[in-house]
Amino acid sequence: MSVVAFVTNEPGVDRELSTELADHTIQVSSIALGPTASPMFIVESLPTGGDLVVVVAADIPADRALAVLEHIDRNRPTAATVLITDSDSALLRRAMAVGVRSVISPTASLEELADTVREVMAWLARRRQVLVGVDGDPERRVLSVLSAKGGTGKTTVASNVAIALATVAPGQVVLVDFDLQFGDVEYALRLKPEQTIADLGRARDRVDATSVKAFLTAHPSGVFALCAPSSPAESEDLSAVVLDRVIDLLASQFRYVVIDTAGGIDDASLVAMDHATDLLLMSSTDIPSVRALQKTVHALGSLGFADRNWHYILNRSDAKVGLTPDDVREAIGMPIDLAIPDTKAMTLAMNQGSPLIETDPRAAASKKLTTFVQRFIPEIQAEPIRKSAFSLRSSR
């Protein structure tokens, strides 16, 4: 049973929301916050068990509302919170800092509030999957490759990671291009897709877990790819709801889903992060890229993604200009999980549509990528990745 707790002093709002939701699996209750009640009183009044969404209504003064939300964030971290308030920028920043999942206007309709509650409930369900693995299987992973700026090598890393995973799980890896306007996965792997994510989006509910594979393009390495639309105009119909379903379908069929995203944080990358078991955060050594990474790390923590597995990747780590890996490590306050040396061979390989880990597994960058990828592989399968990678070269 899922629960919505409505913090409000207005009577009857819980019944109205329950009627609008029209879902017997969601129980709606209200908690009044009297003038002398402490924020901890609200926390102690919250039900236990099941997914919990706490909605703080507009009739609660802003300072008291934020105090309640902060106490919930500290004491009930598995709950999701919704704040009904005017869109004051300073208040929104404070709300983000205490983990508020969604903010809606006091003028929003009851239908809009119900839709927001459903979206947050769906997010809670996805987060629960993340904590135990996709479909309850801790070996299933969704890896989202992200960067605040373009040009950091996301597609290069995503392609090489996917191919490395396919050496131990051939046919069980899908690489998804969520750079919906200018995605390069098809060029990075030298593919000629007959269908793209745009075709999958147009098919919508006619696609199920079995037929989704008809929209994928096979690569000789054992990786399947869902390529970006052939033109930016085709991406217009790919809403967050559609992308949400795409990942759900693929995660039900593949052990590993690797998602390449556009630079920055857009709607598609937010969907990718919502589903991710692992966030691969990328930067190069130039100062603007590192600053952007700092801001991204802070923003993702505020947006509620701290429970994911975070992996920091520094590309072109030995570049002659820019910051050193130690400088970057100090700037972001976290260790670098993968430092990829600046190599012309990797750029050349990608330009030729043949990722370096496939064409030259003995290269320094390939070895680093291979070692990094082993963290996503069950220990019993970790050894074959080295043999498989080196056998690629010997078989040529």
Image (cartoon, rainbow, N blue to C red):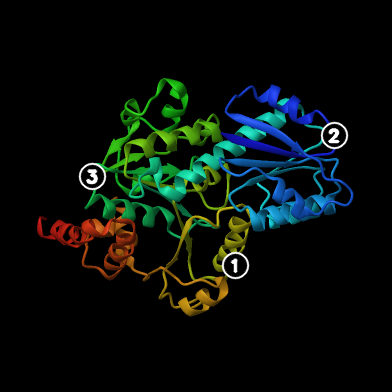
| Residues packed near mark 3 inside 10 Å, few (<14), some (14 to 19) or many (20 plus) | many
Quarter-of-image position of residue 60: top right
Closer to us: 332 or 263:
332
Q: Using the image, determine if residue 394 lies above or below residue 187.
A: below
Q: Secondary structure at mark 1?
A: helix
Q: Secondary structure at mark 2?
A: loop
Residue 223: x, y in percent? Answer: 27, 44
Q: Which residue is mark 1?
A: 291
Identify the disc placed on residue 10.
2
Q: Is residue 383 visible?
A: yes
Closer to us: 22 or 175:
22
Closer to us: 175 or 183:
175
Marks 1 and 3, Cα distance to the nearest angstrom?
Answer: 37 Å
Q: Kindly identify the residue that appears in the image at 16 percent across and 56 percent down.
A: 392
| Residues packed near mark 1 inside 10 Å, few (<14), some (14 to 19) or many (20 plus) | some
Identify the disc placed on residue 242.
none
